[in-house]
Amino acid sequence: MAFDNFLNIEFDFKSNNFRTSGNINPEMYMEVVSDFLRGQIGKGKDEREPNKRDIYNIEITVDLSEDRFNVLDNCGNKSLRDGILRYFLSTI
């Protein structure tokens, strides 16, 4: 499995701003993030405590050959991560 396509999203909590990087075309951000979030529906509640940070980083990598996602983040729980991603979608 090759995760060659990636999108890094940095959310600055204090300034309420996003920065993005990666090799996914910005025109595809909506589709990639929406598809990932759709796959999270029904996965259950994450009971872990969210991390309290000024800067949150989320990296979404995509294997297009199998439509698989891998996500790394420093949010501490999936609810915070997914909330940040939903907010990101509302800004693009």
Image (cartoon, helix red, strand yellow):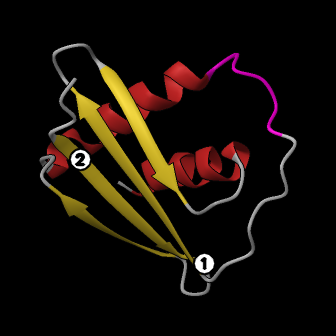
Magenta-tinted stretch: 41-46
Q: Nearer the viewer, residue 6 or 30?
A: 6
Q: Is residue 90 visible?
A: no
Residue at image mark 2: 6
Residue at image mark 1: 13
Give the answer, above or below, for where 33 lies relative to 89: above
For the residues labelled 1 and 2, the Cα–Cα distance comes to 22 Å
Q: Position of residue 55 (x, y in %)?
A: 54, 78
Residue at the spot 22% in from the left edge and 35% down from the top edge: 3
Residue type at numbered disc 2: Phe
Q: Position of residue 15 (x, y in %)?
A: 54, 86
> Left or right: where does residue 2 sit relative to residue 90?
left
User: Within 10 Å of the Cα at label 1, are there few (<14), some (14-19), or many (20+) other Cα atoms?
Assistant: some
Image quarter in which the N terminus is found: top left
Any magenta on residue 3? no
Figure quadrant of residue 9: bottom left
> Left or right: where does residue 23 sit relative to residue 85?
left
Image quarter in which the C terminus is found: bottom left
SS at badge 2? strand
> CB of mark 1 within 8 Å of CB of mark 2?
no
